[in-house]
Amino acid sequence: MTQKTPLYQVFLVLSGISFLIFIFLYLLVSKRNLELIEAYNQLEISGSKSFGTIKEFNLTEKQNLKNHIYTYSVPDETGRLTEIVEYVDQITHKKLRIGDTVVVTRKTIQLLGKSTLISRINGNTNSIPHNILIEKFSLYGVIFSFLLSLVSLFMYKRRI
């Protein structure tokens, strides 16, 4: 007669592993978002002015809200061009055309050990971008792992 692993032990191991993975992912993304928000807040104070060239424009509509998305190239400190994608407000959108040169504020930051160039078009009042979707996904993963561990503990009590 072979011994079988009880189902609650399998669920408990899976929930423990997934909890560790999702809590790590949540903490990593939350830290990155906080660093990005702080860097964008400091951008207007300590960033350097530069010129960027608008390459592309896209218009998206979510829940009857129009989002103007511009892609532009900005040189970093070494002169290498970097493409930046930015949501632009309605007033700034009316001033911009593809091929135009715009004044931007740029700064190179260290984000999770990687050098990253952040930039904003001067006069743009739209909100700062952050990865709320990934943060929510990882938080839902933590909740799912917790619920899975509760199910395994319930199964242990009932010896299923």
Image (cartoon, rainbow, N blue to C red):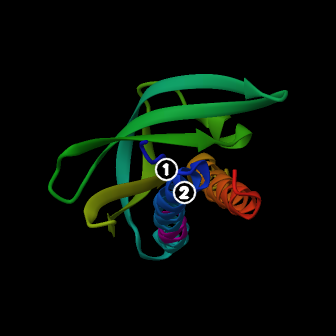
Q: Main secondary structure of the magenta part?
A: helix
Q: Quadrant of the N terminus?
A: top left
Q: Is residue 31 magenta?
A: yes
Q: Amino acid at mark 2?
A: Gln
User: Which is nearer the eye, 95 or 55?
Assistant: 55
Question: Residue 118 in the image: x percent, y percent?
Answer: 40, 56
Q: Residue at x 45, y 43 (%)?
A: 102
Which residue was labeled with disc 1?
Answer: 5
In the rendered image, the vertical position of residue 37 relative to residue 65, given as above or below: below
Q: Amino acid at mark 1?
A: Thr
Q: Residue at x 72, y 38 (%)?
A: 90
Which residue was labeled with disc 2?
Answer: 9
In the rendered image, the vertical position of residue 108 relative to residue 1, given as above or below: below
Q: Residue at x 75, y 60 (%)?
A: 154
For the residue labelled by badge 2, is the local secondary structure a helix, a strand or a loop?
A: helix
Question: Residue 48 in the image: x percent, y percent?
Answer: 36, 66
